[in-house]
Amino acid sequence: MAAIEKRSRGDWQQLDKAHHLHPFTDHKSLHKKRSRIITRAEGVYIFDADGNKILDGMSGLWCVNAGYGRQELIDAATEQMKELPYYNNFFQCAHPPSIELAAMLQGISPPQFNRVFFAGSGSESNDTIVRMVRTYWDLMGQPERHTIISRHNAYHGSTVAAASLGGMKPMHRQSGLPIPGIVHVDQPYWFGSDQRLSPHEFGLQAARAIEDKIKDVGPEKVAAFIGEPIQGAGGVIIPPDSYWPEVQRICDEYGILLISDEVITGFGRLGEWFGADHFATRPDFMTFAKGVTSGYLPLGGVFVSDRVADVLIDKAGEFFHGYTYSGHPVACAVAIANIKLIQSESLVSRIKDDIGPYLQEKWRALAEHPLVGDTRMVGLMGAFELVKSKDPLERFHESQGAGVVFRDTLMGEGVCMRAVGNTIICAPPFVLTLAEADELIEKTWVALDQSHQALSP
Ligand code: PXG
């Protein structure tokens, strides 16, 4: 018997309104329009309860990298459910899926990583990192080194520690965050600056804000710096080329740990396995989630470098931390199948050499539209900025809702992207074909023209 009842769209909307609290949602405004009910998906397309076919330009929520309906992943889950649906990795136990996945992750990660710790999500993984970072410095005999530097507008998750690491002011306001010992510096968002510096100089300046903060806090108190290689939820902020080398220099000079939050950039999105490979950083931790299973099941975790893992193993005794679902066998089995699929279909090099450059070129050309002030894309992770005027540069006021106007218009054309203020962001599945890329771009042009009319005075 099917687990899920078949109902009409209206019935589902009614039940949803009555019983379901959604993540990151203004429920009053949702209840005025009702939810869009997504019922199924195939390849790069999702289908709603009205039968609309929508090209998913966001890979779900930056995660369905292998595309929908992949039989390999379905089979891996089914077989593992039959064999061992659950067991834990506590109390000196382990099971083949968590062991095999840990070894497999070692094989695709940069050389300083030989060990992983599993969690259920990106947020949990970043909480784990806060615990590990502070424990590491305690064990190193420097217990005053507890401050972690992050960036305004960063997104590192929604639990208390992860939201504190994040730099989203509205999140902080709602719950008395950040927790003590987490401080923030500006993000490397050149387009959002006054643009008086060249991108190169601006990147150096943004990195040196970290150094200034280290001096402010006191170098002996700073434990780590955390950053997404490219900020995702904050609007796909691609830093100038000068930024990450300078951040690495600063971390090295002050001996502080570098945390690369790879929840979005991990597993190929930028045309390399990890953002750290793309930007040539040498992080001490990498956070992962989302793309590790292509979103088919929840799984997250932390790559822990030898520098930290050796100390934890040698000196910590028991590390009092872990989750019921750390290394869940079914999620790990799906992750293994997913990574095998990425390898066998050469999806990472496809992004670097084929679909990536193809989409990037068409994406850049969107800058010719009068409404588009800046376009940027690395691998399959991109954004453009909606502007009121290009010369002189004038941005829309947030209250004009230009981003939402464009997003909704594009959805009407059958393509899903996200609006972050007036920045439109896009991260399609890795299996996007050239023809599907054409469709995505053509519909974007149509939606830009329509939005231009709607937004003209
Ligand atoms: N780090 C990064 C870089 C993320 O993008 C998390 C951590 C947290 O992962 P979990 O699995 O706990 O959600 C994320 C999640 C958006 C959006 O609006 C982005 C995320 C989650 C929800 C919404 O772009 N990223």
Image (spheres, rainbow, N blue to C red):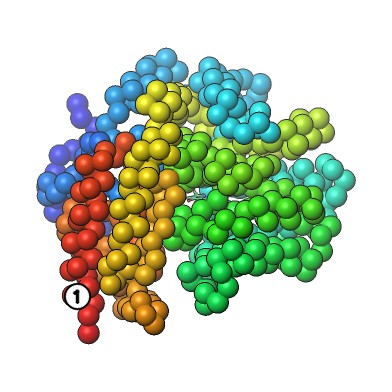
Dot 1 amino acid type: Ala
Which of these two is toward me, 271 or 267?
271
Q: Is mark 1 within 8 Å of ligand 1?
A: no
Q: Residues within 10 Å of mark 1 (few under 14, many from 20)?
A: few
Q: Quadrant of residue 421?
A: bottom left
Residue visible at 29% across and 40% down in the picture: 432
Q: Residue furthest bottom?
A: 457
| Residue at point 71%, 60% (across, down) | 181
| Residue 12 vertical position relative to residue 176 in the rendered view, above or below | above
Say left or right for 96 vs 220: left
Residue 341 showing in the rendered view? no
Hey, which quadrant is residue 204 in on the image?
A: bottom right
Residue 242 appears left or right of 249:
left
Q: Which residue is mark 1?
A: 454
State the residue in front, 271 or 313.
271
Q: What percent of the width, then of the height, locates residue 206?
A: 63, 65
